[in-house]
Image (spheres, rainbow, N blue to C red):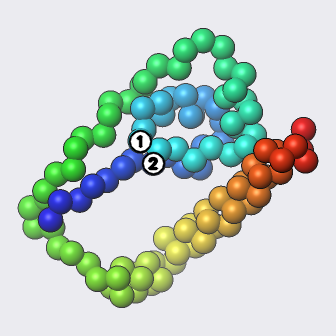
Amino acid sequence: MNTKTKIMGASCRYKEQILELAGLDLITISPGLLSQLANVDGIVLRKLPQSPKASVYKNEMPISKADFYTNLLTDECASELLSTGIEKFKTDAESLDKIIKGLIP
């Protein structure tokens, strides 16, 4: 089975963390950090190599959707972190909408 994977950074709290992750496929950035990054002088250089192309893993076993959710829900840490992360993304998205609409300076 070929698995196409993208590497995404998340939960960055400081612009320096984001700058050190330059080169990731994706990164989530809060509105406050996005504003700080807009004021960075100079060129941001890629710090990380590009992600490798999708590869085939030996002994890779597909997992059903039901098994995935069972594993997720029985792992307290994973389910709590996922829920908290999604709620934070929602809050940040709402803040970003307000910034874009000019409701927040």
Q: Is residue 14 above or below residue 45?
A: below
Of the residues shown, which amino acid type is indicated by label 1? Asp
Q: Amino acid at mark 2?
A: Met
Which residue, given by chain and number where applicable, does mark 1 sit on?
25
Answer yes or no: is residue 77 visible: no
Q: Residue furthest front?
A: 101
Residue 103 badge:
none
- Left or right, 96 with reference to 58: right
Confirm or deny contact between disc 2 and disc 1 (CB under 8 A): yes
Picture quadrant of residue 31:
top right
Residue 9 x, y percent position in the rendering: 49, 46
Query: How many residues crowd mark 2 within 10 Å: few (<14), some (14–19), many (20+)?
Result: few
Which element carries disc 1, helix, strand or loop?
loop
Q: Is residue 63 above or below residue 11?
A: below
Instruction: Work out which quarter of the rendered image holds the N terminus and state it.
Output: bottom left
Task: Name above or below for residue 85 compared with residue 98.
Answer: below
Q: Which residue is mark 2?
A: 8
Give the side of residue 35 with respect to residue 59, left or right.
Answer: right
Quarter-of-image position of residue 40? top right
Q: Residues within 10 Å of mark 1 (few under 14, many from 20)?
A: some
At x 56%, y 67%, the residue is 81
